[in-house]
Image (tube, grey):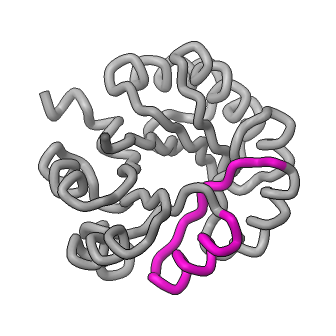
Amino acid sequence: MLKKLLITDPAFYGVEPRFFAGKLARTLRRTRPEMISYRNKQKTCFRSGARATVQIAKRFGIRKVFINGSLQTARKLGCGVHLTSTQHPLIRRAKSLRISVLVSTHSKAEIRRCHRSGADFLLYSPVFYVKGKSSPKGLGDLNQITATMRAHIIALGGITTEREVAQIAATKAYGFASIRYFTDYSQRK
């Protein structure tokens, strides 16, 4: 079964702790993802948002929570870390601390390198078109990678509707990740 990874973004959830927590709880109640990645590149209220994400995830029975970019915060909160493609050298350090690793990748070479380094989950993007991002990898590329590698590869990029989710499900991807799929949920009904 295709796993769902919700990625937070201050543009949709805000950063003020109570507003963020309320919006995240409402989104989880409606969409029921199995995984969450707390992403707040603004760094405003970062720790309180990370703490709130972990607490809310527990309330909803979500065991796989990742904190974007901070090994220290992930370790302190007892959850995983979401590393960017430029942070791949930290994979081994995270694994030595027994921290689960989700890492962003954008090429087959990055996927192989991060998998060999011990990453538990590999985001591959962008699969579909996303304004302002590099050219989409496409389903053919995703299908080739997921068919030839025994790894937890999660598709990311341009996944906003059930149509894209169904296309990802037709591959051997472990799951899909999105910001807008979860925040635009009410518009899909």
Q: Nearer the viewer, residue 66 or 101?
A: 101
Residue 155 pos. (x, y %): 37, 60
Q: Nearer the viewer, residue 33 or 11?
A: 33
Drawn side of residue 181 relative to residue 68, left or right: left
Asked which quadrant contains residue 173, the reply is bottom left
Q: Nearer the viewer, residue 65 or 48?
A: 65
Drawn side of residue 132 relative to residue 139, left or right: right
State the extent of the magenta-drawn residues as a range: 98-118
Question: How many discs mark residues in the rendered view?
Answer: 0
Say if 173 sits above or below 140 in the image: above
Say if 53 sits above or below 153 in the image: above
Drawn side of residue 5 relative to residue 158, left or right: right
Which residue in the rendered view is the most extreme toward the bottom? 109
Residue found 38% across the figure and 59% down from its top: 156
Residue found 58% across the figure and 13% down from its top: 59
Residue found 83% across the figure and 42% down from its top: 75
Q: Quadrant of the C terminus?
A: top left
Drawn side of residue 47 relative to residue 34, left or right: right
Q: Is residue 136 visible?
A: no
Residue 66 pos. (x, y %): 63, 43
Say if 116 sits above or below 71 in the image: below
Q: Quadrant of the N terminus?
A: top left
Residue 83 pos. (x, y %): 66, 61
Residue 126 pos. (x, y %): 36, 69
Q: Nearer the viewer, residue 14 or 127?
A: 127
Asked which quadrant contains residue 114, the reply is bottom right
Magenta includes 106?
yes
